[in-house]
Amino acid sequence: MDDPQTIYLAAEIIKKGGIVAFPTETVYGLGADAFNPLAVARVFEVKRRPYFDPLIVHVANPDNVEKLVKEIPPGAKKLMERFWPGPLTVVFLKGNDIPDIVTAGLPTVAIRMPNHSMALSLIKESKCSIAAPSANPFGYLSPTTAEHVREQLGDRVDLVLDGGPCPVGVESTIVSFLEGKSRLLRPGGVPLEEIESIIGRVEVSPTEDKPSAPGMLPRHYAPRTPIVLDWNEKNIELYKNKNIGLLAFQEKENRLKISHTEVLSKKGDLREAAANLFAAIRRLDALNLDLILAEAIPEMGLGRAIMDRLRRASGTRFTDSSADQSDSSNGHAEECEKESRTK
Ligand code: TXA
Ligand code: MG
């Protein structure tokens, strides 16, 4: 599917104001020309995404960032040089020309250069910056295969480019550079440790009481089946007579009565676990289980992004420093929950 003709067709659709689902190294995105507000509006509509939730602008060349932003802070520049193309999104003060619908009226814009040949060819061929959220209904898990996209949005998008399974499997890490501070807004495909090794300490805790990225809402990335993260074999009695699925990190003996187990990485490799995460949850979600017990994962490297998504999928309130941006008192969480349950 990486053939020039398919890319040409997809690029024509983008240029004419259509919407195309395309693979990136993290998850599939649903793209539109960032400078065509009507096309971008269709992306929001198809996803049933609230307009307060801004989109990431995807570029194929770091040189293009200059005309999209007010300035490139030195820390941002270093990260772009080190991690682009790759699973890192940087939040800048926005330039004047970017339509408000893309940034939800914020004075900032999130930008990334994906590391996927199809995504890069699509951006280059269309000669557009492409605004794209993950290609899933709002609040649901991000798609990591073209099949996931087709199942949920297939008939509502103009084209789905198929680039096979996404190698990283969790969304990009988001770092903002505002008011002279670097802040982690979402853990993702580039581990925090690697970012800090380049620019030093990054603030993780929030300074505001509303999440600045809805991906930070306490219930997000959620399947239909309840996910339980806070359990152990001792309190398993609570779930007797329930039809239970297990999302295990590694294969190991247990005494649970489980209908189906998904193992994320037999050898305990966090990269492999991240790549398998969303597809494994989707498979469990398709089994009509009463609940999914998820095993905790070591919170280092990609484990931080995995645990972040598991907490949000389970609706667990955040208590540790890695994921404390949540604030379920703001009502957004409820909206999200409704959205994901109506799917
Ligand atoms: O890996 C990814 O980032 C994927 C692929 C397709 O690139 N995209 C993705 O997009 O995950 P989305 O829309 O599902 O998540 C983007 C997150 C949202 O939580 C949004 O609120 C946040 O980025 N965001 C976008 N613009 C922002 C801004 N100006 N300030 C803070 N957060 C922003
Ligand atoms: Mg998303």
Image (spheres, rainbow, N blue to C red):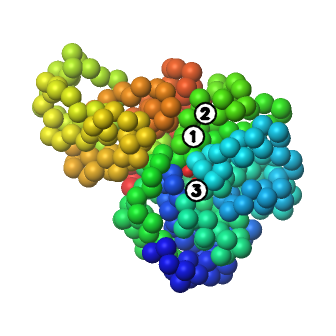
- Asked whether mark 3 lies closer than 8 Å to ligand 1, one says no
Instruction: Please rate how many residues cluster around mark 2, counting C-alpha atoms within 10 Å: few if below 14, some from 14 to 19, many from 20.
Output: some
Instruction: Classify mark 1: helix, strand or loop.
Output: loop
Q: Which amino acid does label 3 sit on?
A: Asn
Q: Which of 335 and 144 is in front in this view?
A: 144
Rendered view: 141 above or below 8: above
Instruction: Identify the mark at residue 194; answer none if there is no mark.
Output: 2
* Residue 286 in sight here: yes
Marks 2/3 in contact by CB < 8 Å: the verdict is no
Residue at label 3? Answer: 115
Provide residue 159's location: percent of width, then percent of height. 49, 75
Q: Distance between the residues labelled 2 and 3?
A: 17 Å
Horizontal relation, residue 167 to residue 328: left or right: left
Q: Earlier in the sequence, mark 3 or mark 1?
A: 3
Provide residue 189's location: percent of width, then percent of height. 53, 43
Provide residue 135's location: percent of width, then percent of height. 50, 60
